[in-house]
Image (tube, rainbow, N blue to C red):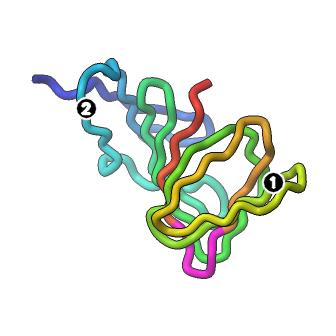
């Protein structure tokens, strides 16, 4: 059986070849080939390896130790901490969400949030909300 269709992504703010776009119907089993994409810088001290799966961004995101993402993100995400820990602060002042290795989390759409890595950094698996 043929493997899923893949092509270069060209996501905004990302150079050519920054990811793979999987276009197969979700009714078929498929491999999501993170290993064929390079880590690309997202912000100072933060890099990601991204793949689009039927129009939804999946990413492995690495934070260097203690790094705070400077900008606020309004897009929702679901994620899992692979290594380390990350704390999310919210622009509306709600309580900080601290997530450690082995824990999953969700961040709502429209609620400005940004992450700060713990003392040993963090490695996350994120899925952005379809939109």
Which residue appears at 51% of the width and 61% of the height? 103
Mark 2–mark 1 Cα distance, whole angstroms, equals: 35 Å
Farthest-out residue, right? 93
Residue 103 within the segment the image draws in magenta: no
**Quadrant of the image occupied by residue 24:** top left
**Looking at the image, residue 110 lies above or below residue 25:** below
Asked whether residue 121 is drawn in magenta, I would say yes
Packing grade of label 2 (10 A; few <14, some 14-19, many >=20) is: some
Residue 28 location, x and y as percent?
25, 22
Q: Is residue 100 left or right of residue 50?
A: right
Q: Which residue occupies 30% across, 43% down?
A: 33
Residue 52 lies in quadrant: top left
Count every numbered label the image shows and give the total. 2
Q: Residue furthest left?
A: 1
Considering the image in quadrants, where does the C terminus appear?
Answer: top right
Query: In the image as oriented, which residue stretches furthest toward the bottom?
Result: 119
Judged left or right of residue 73, residue 2 is: left
Near-viewer residue (56 or 6): 56
**Pointer 1: what residue?**
90
Neighbours of disc 1 within 10 Å: few (<14), some (14-19), many (20+): some
Q: Residue at x 69, y 60 (%)?
A: 115
Q: Is residue 84 left or right of residue 119?
A: left
On the image, the x and y values in percent for residue 68 come to 72, 66
* Residue at image coords 52%, 62%: 62
- Percent across and percent down for residue 109 are 72, 36
Q: Which residue is mark 2?
A: 30
Which residues are drawn in magenta?
117-122
Secondary structure predominantly adopted by residues drawn in magenta: strand
């Amino acid at each position: 059986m043929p493997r899923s269709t893949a092509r270069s992504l060209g996501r905004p703010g990302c150079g050519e070849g920054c990811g793979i776009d999987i276009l197969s119907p979700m009714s078929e089993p498929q491999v999501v080939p993170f290993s064929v994409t390079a880590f690309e810088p997202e912000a100072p001290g933060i890099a990601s390896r991204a793949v689009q799966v039927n129009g939804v961004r999946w990413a492995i995101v690495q934070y260097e130790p203690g790094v705070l993402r400077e900008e606020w993100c309004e897009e929702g995400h679901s994620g899992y901490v692979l290594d380390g820990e990350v704390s999310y602060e919210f622009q509306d002042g709600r309580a900080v969400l601290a997530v450690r290795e082995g824990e999953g989390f969700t961040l709502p759409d429209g609620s400005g949030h940004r992450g700060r890595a713990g003392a040993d950094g963090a490695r996350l698996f994120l899925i952005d909300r379809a939109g």
